[in-house]
């Protein structure tokens, strides 16, 4: 039978019917015999069947072998299926075991955590509760200065706090160690009290550097903390003993130091006679003679180097009385004042920080405790300075002291020590009150100065009172500038009042001169000396300098007109007459003066050289300051 390897299109029943119908129609149309065709097909089918049977018979051995292989494969697959089924069952058992083991692991882990926690807390509890032999030995046998004692004291304090906390929980084991710990506490308190009182007693020894025992106290600051935590009465006893001892020590120190320093004060200090308007001479020692003797008032009306107290010498070493006595040194009031205040600042700064640190106080409590220590000393200083300031007649010295108070108050603020602000306020108030009184005396002396009774005649040169005023005002302004503050309103009011008195004095002194020209020269020279002194010491512009410069310019303009008038009176008169007409645009009236122009020009051309030489000579002779005279010449021409 012939076969075709090409793929056969499947024939559906409906398609087969269609084919048969077409085949039948084609056969009928062609006249084919269907019976023959049917027999032909049957024969072909029988032949094909026979071929298939023969082929199967030929391949029977192979088919049998294939059958055996198929049976073996089925058996193998069945075994594999059994194995996989067994594995599946075992895997289900393993999953259950793993879940069970996981649950057991969580339980075991929690048990371990709980046991470790209990073990840690129990171990800590036992460590905190048990009193080791090293602690007993350290507290009972070691000296308070020994580091081991301090170390064991820290441990003892920890155990005391722990036992006290456990007592509130009614822990039974507390009773086993309570007596031992209490006995150690009492022994430690006894040792600490004795050690602290011994250290405090060292402050009572003369010539002792009190900072040495204070450093020892700070090193063992925990001693007082232990006292405060376990026996407040003992802590109060130690604190009261410290306050009493240090209060007496500082009082004795400042009382002695201040007394010795003021013995070194210059004997040639300012007196009530050293006033701005006082006569420049004093009586001689001879009974029959009133020989003028020049009194040195350099420290009264001039600054010198005293302003260094506000800059380079502000934090200079203290004056040592016995060393200064051996060197025969004497000091002005403000130098003594500086040394005392700087000593107070240093001691107060150190003491305030110490009491706050050692006694564990702050805020107002620290200020109150500090006041108990330094109160007597500060009160003594206020009383002493009240007497000394009242006896001070040096205004520059007083203002220097005011500036020093400001500087040292700022220094203590920088150190975060605000404990003696009241002291600075009291001292500053006394200084201002005294300064105002002295300035009032100076002003009254100028106001009451009788120019007719002056010992020296008045000429056009700068007057000695004006020289004093220039030096004095410059000194005050320099100190004010060095203080780093804006000029105080009180100071400005004092300077304004004094300036008014000086201007009045200049006018009175000028009346003693004969000619108007001399009066102008006198006033210009005096204003010039004031401006010269101010320009020499002061860098910036001040109210006083501006005011005097304007006054001087007014007098210079008046003087220039006065000098020019004798030589050019016709020209000056002509200008004075024509200027208003020009300003008012009266051209008709100006024509009346045209005839004078040529005459004035001829007169000026003939005499101007001689007149200028005479004026130059007169100006240079009249003014003591060549620079001032030159500037007036420039104004004139």
Image (cartoon, helix red, strand yellow):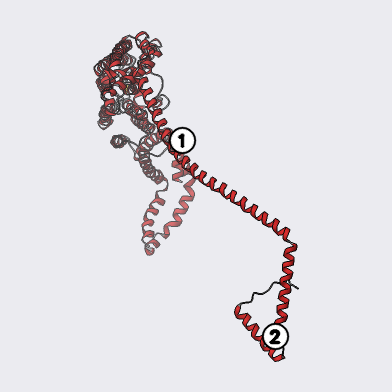
**Mark 2: few/some/many CA within 10 Å (<14, 14-19, 20+):** few
**Residue 8 sits in which quadrant?**
bottom right
Q: Position of residue 136 (x, y in %)?
A: 35, 11
**Residue 548 sits in which quadrant?**
top left
Q: Nearer the viewer, residue 356 or 173?
A: 173
| Marks 1 and 2, how far apart at CA | 170 Å
Compared with 629, 600 (above or below) is below
Q: Position of residue 470 (x, y in %)?
A: 36, 32
State the SS at label 1: helix
Q: Position of residue 377 (x, y in %)?
A: 27, 18
Q: Nearer the viewer, residue 80 or 354?
A: 80
Q: Nearer the viewer, mark 1 or mark 2?
A: 2
Task: Return the residue at label 1.
Answer: 626
Compared with 429, 148 (above or below) is above
User: The N terminus lies in which quarter of the figure?
Assistant: bottom right
Q: Are marks 1 and 2 in contact (CB under 8 Å)?
A: no
Residue 527 lies left or right of residue 68; in this view the side is left
Q: Nearer the viewer, residue 637 or 533?
A: 533
State the SS at label 2: helix
Task: Return the residue at label 2.
Answer: 35
């Amino acid at each position: 039978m012939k076969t075709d390897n090409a793929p056969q299109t499947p024939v559906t029943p409906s398609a087969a019917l269609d084919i048969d119908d077409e085949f039948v129609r084609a056969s009928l149309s062609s006249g084919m015999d269907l019976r023959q065709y049917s027999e032909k097909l049957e024969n072909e089918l029988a032949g094909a069947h026979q071929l298939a049977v023969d082929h199967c018979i030929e391949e029977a051995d192979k088919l049998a072998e294939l059958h055996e292989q198929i049976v073996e494969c089925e058996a193998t697959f069945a075994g594999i299926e059994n194995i996989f089924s067994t594995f599946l069952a075992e895997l289900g058992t393993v999953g259950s075991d793993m879940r069970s083991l996981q649950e057991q692991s969580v339980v075991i882990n929690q048990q371990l955590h709980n046991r470790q926690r209990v073990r840690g807390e129990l171990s800590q509890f036992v460590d905190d509760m048990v009193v080791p032999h090293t602690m007993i030995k350290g507290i009972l046998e070691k000296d308070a200065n020994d580091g081991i004692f301090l170390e064991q004291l820290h441990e003892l304090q920890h155990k005391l706090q722990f036992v006290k906390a456990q007592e509130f929980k009614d822990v039974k084991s507390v009773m086993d160690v309570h007596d031992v710990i209490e006995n150690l506490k009492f022994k430690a308190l006894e040792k600490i009290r004795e050690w602290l009182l011994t250290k405090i007693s060292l402050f009572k020894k003369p010539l002792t550097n009190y900072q040495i025992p204070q450093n020892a106290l700070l090193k063992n600051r925990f001693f007082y903390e232990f006292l405060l935590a376990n026996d407040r009465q003992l802590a109060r006893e130690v604190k009261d003993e410290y306050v009493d001892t240090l209060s007496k020590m500082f009082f004795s120190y400042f009382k002695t130091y201040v007394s010795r320093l003021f013995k070194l004060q210059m004997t040639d200090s300012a007196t009530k006679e050293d006033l701005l308007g006082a006569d420049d001479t004093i009586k001689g020692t001879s009974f029959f003679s009133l020989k003028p003797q020049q009194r040195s008032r350099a420290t009264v009306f001039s600054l010198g180097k005293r302003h260094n107290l506000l800059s380079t010498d502000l934090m200079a070493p203290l004056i040592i009385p016995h060393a200064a006595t051996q060197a025969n040194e004497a000091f002005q009031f403000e130098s003594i004042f500086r040394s005392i205040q700087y000593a107070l600042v240093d001691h107060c700064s150190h003491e305030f920080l110490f009491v706050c640190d050692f006694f564990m106080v702050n805020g107002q409590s620290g200020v109150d405790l500090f006041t108990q220590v330094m109160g007597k000393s500060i009160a003594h200083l206020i009383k002493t300075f009240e007497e000394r300031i009242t006896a001070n007649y040096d205004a520059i010295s007083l203002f220097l002291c005011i500036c020093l108070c400001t500087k040292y108050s700022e220094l203590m603020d920088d150190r975060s020590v605000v404990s003696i602000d009241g002291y600075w306020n009291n001292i500053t108030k006394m200084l201002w009150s005294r300064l105002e009184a002295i300035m009032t005396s100076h002003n009254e002396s100028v106001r009451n100065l009788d120019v007719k009774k002056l010992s020296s005649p008045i000429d056009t040169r700068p007057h000695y009172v004006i020289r004093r005023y220039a030096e004095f005002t410059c000194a005050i302004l320099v100190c004010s500038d060095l203080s780093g503050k804006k000029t105080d309103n009180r100071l400005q009011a004092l300077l304004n009042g004094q300036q008014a008195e000086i201007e009045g004095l200049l006018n009175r002194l000028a009346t003693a001169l004969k000619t108007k020209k001399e009066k102008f020269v006198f006033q210009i020279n005096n204003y010039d000396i004031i401006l010269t002194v101010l320009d020499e010491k002061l860098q910036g512009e001040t109210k006083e300098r501006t005011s005097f410069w304007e006054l001087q310019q007014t007098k210079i303009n008046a003087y220039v007109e006065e000098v020019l008038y004798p030589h050019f009176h016709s020209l000056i008169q002509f200008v004075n007459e024509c200027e208003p007409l020009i300003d008012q645009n009266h051209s008709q009236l100006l024509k009346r003066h045209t005839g004078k122009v040529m005459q004035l020009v001829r007169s000026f051309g003939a005499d101007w050289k001689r007149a200028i030489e005479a004026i130059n000579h007169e100006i240079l002779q009249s003014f003591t300051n060549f620079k001032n005279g030159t500037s007036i010449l420039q104004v004139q021409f």
